[in-house]
Image (cartoon, grey):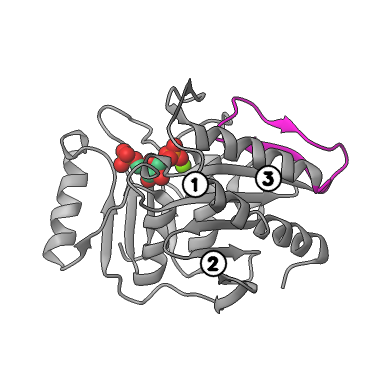
Amino acid sequence: DADRDMAALIIKISALAEPIRNEFALRRGKADTKNVFGEEQLVLDKWANQFLKEKLKNTRMVKMLGSEEESDIIKLKDGAVFSVTIDPLDGSSNIESNNLVGTILGIYRDDLPVQGRKQVAALYLLFGPVTTLVYTVGKGVHEFLYTRRGFLLKEADIKLPGRGELYGIGGLRKDWTPGMEKFVEWLEREGYKLRYGGSFTGDFNQTLQYGGIFAYPALSSKPEGKLRLLFEANPMSFIIEQAGGISSNGKMPILDIIPESVNQRTPLFIGNKDL
Ligand code: AHM
Ligand code: MG
């Protein structure tokens, strides 16, 4: 359902899944540097950022690139069609413990930074026991499974289940607002089960599969929450809306937020509409 340029770009991105995954066993440990958010970088964070930057540049289809690991928007090719945002290795603190990690991309025709509503595609690669690619171009959400024969369709037009099963909420409980505490008590009374893995991509993916809610709320120690509007919240918000769900910062839809800076954080609530 994507136009030709978009399909070509997504197919090129899909070809990066295997080379990225292949590095996980080889590039271990800390890089002894910090990213623009003051977070310690891993060797893999830096490598994935460089690798994606170079590969996206080589497509000659990307004019601007925004990355969680860069302080500013990078110009890749004048006159090219797309702008792309990346979280090169989401959930990288899961690398050491061998839990889920992912790569999240948002694709625009506009220049960056711009409202998430302007996205023309969003996708993520999830590196779990198997590698999957989930994407939307605004015509539903589709999931592919990586096999020896390349990516094969796993599920077309994914929709959230009517009633969700799970919840996962980030941040220390003592830093939650009283409202957040009450909400979680209510979720538990209603029979929602806690599952939190510490990788947004993984936690989002299980929300898509089983329904429910994922949140990384405002914390007393982090009033803007932790997750980044451009690199994490926007692409997943496009996907959840296409799957019949919704996302919010607690006050307004994530996709309607007009970014004031590239590295803006946002509280995030994402999943089934009723929650
Ligand atoms: P990262 O992109 O640097 O890995 O940071 C984002 C990650 C998310 O994947 C996840 O939802 C969150 O940080 C987990 O944070 P915490 O360790 O506070 O649970
Ligand atoms: Mg991330």
Give residue 211's position: percent from left, percent from top.
34, 68
The residue wearing badge 1 is: 24
Amino acid tagged 1: Phe
Give residue 135's position: percent from left, percent from top.
59, 63
Indicate which quadrant contains ligand 1. top left
What is the distance, in whole Å, between disc 3 and disc 2 at their CAs?
Answer: 19 Å
Amino acid tagged 3: Val
SS at mark 3 in the image: strand
Tell us which disc is closer to us: 1 or 3: 1
Please determine whether, in this image, residue 36 is positioned above or below residue 106: above
Give residue 59's position: percent from left, percent from top.
80, 49
Judged left or right of residue 224, residue 25 is right
Q: Residues within 10 Å of mark 2 (few under 14, many from 20)?
A: many
Magenta part of the chain: 59-81
Please determine whether, in this image, residue 27 is positioned above or below residue 149: above
Give the label on residue 10, or none: none
Q: Earlier in the sequence, mark 3 or mark 2?
A: 3
Instruction: Using the rendered view, name the quadrant where residue 192 is placed.
Output: bottom left
Q: Residues within 10 Å of mark 3 (few under 14, many from 20)?
A: many
Residue 267 visible in the current orientation? no
The number of numbered badges drawn on the structure is 3
Q: Main secondary structure of the magenta part?
A: loop
The residue wearing badge 3 is: 84
Q: Is residue 45 magenta?
A: no
Q: Residue at x 19, y 53 (%)?
A: 183
The residue wearing badge 2 is: 242
Q: Is residue 77 magenta?
A: yes
Q: Residues within 10 Å of mark 1 (few under 14, many from 20)?
A: some
Please determine whether, in this image, residue 261 is positioned above or below residue 160: above
Q: Earlier in the sequence, mark 1 or mark 3?
A: 1
